Image: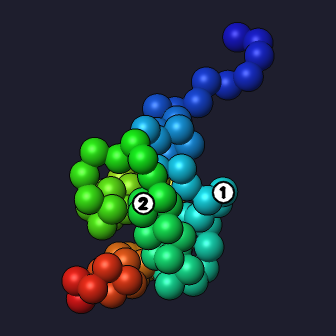
Amino acid sequence: MAGKPKEKWSQDVTDHSDALDLEARVFEQHDPHKIAVSLKRSAEHSDRRKSSPYRSAMSMLTFFINRAGHNLPDKQKRILERAKDELRKEFGRA
């Protein structure tokens, strides 16, 4: 089969979410706080989300962690898990 390989549906959701316009490569950052701040900013500025900014941001982060699966390096998974705690702090839910 020639041509561009078909994108996985989970990558399509991450890239074209109806709820959030994410900063490019946000989940590749190495600072949990920066990831949380970026997700919060995206969620608060979205006019398409269907739930609270906190819930939308946390859902997108959890979705990415779960869908990246075994392809996500352990180090980056730990960073993203810490970003959940940072996100809770950012929204005053820690």
Of labels 1 and 2, the one closer to you: 2
> Tag 2: residue type?
Ala
Using the image, determine if residue 37 lies above or below residue 66: below
The location of residue 2, given as percent across then percent down, is 76, 12
Q: Which residue appears farthest toward the right when viewing the image?
A: 3
The quadrant in which residue 23 appears is bottom right
Residue sitting at x 37%, y 83%: 90
Residue sitting at x 53%, y 38%: 16
Name the foreground residue: 93 vs 62.
Answer: 93
Q: Is residue 66 visible?
A: no
Residue with the mark numbered 1: 24
- Say what secondary structure mark 2 lies in: helix
The location of residue 49, given as percent across then percent down, is 35, 47
Name the foreground residue: 54 vs 47.
Answer: 47
For label 2, the crowd category at 10 Å Cα-Cα, with few meaning under 14, some 14 to 19 and many 20 or more, is: many
Residue with the mark numbered 2: 43
> Tag 1: residue type?
Ala
Distance Cα–Cα, label 1 vs label 2: 14 Å
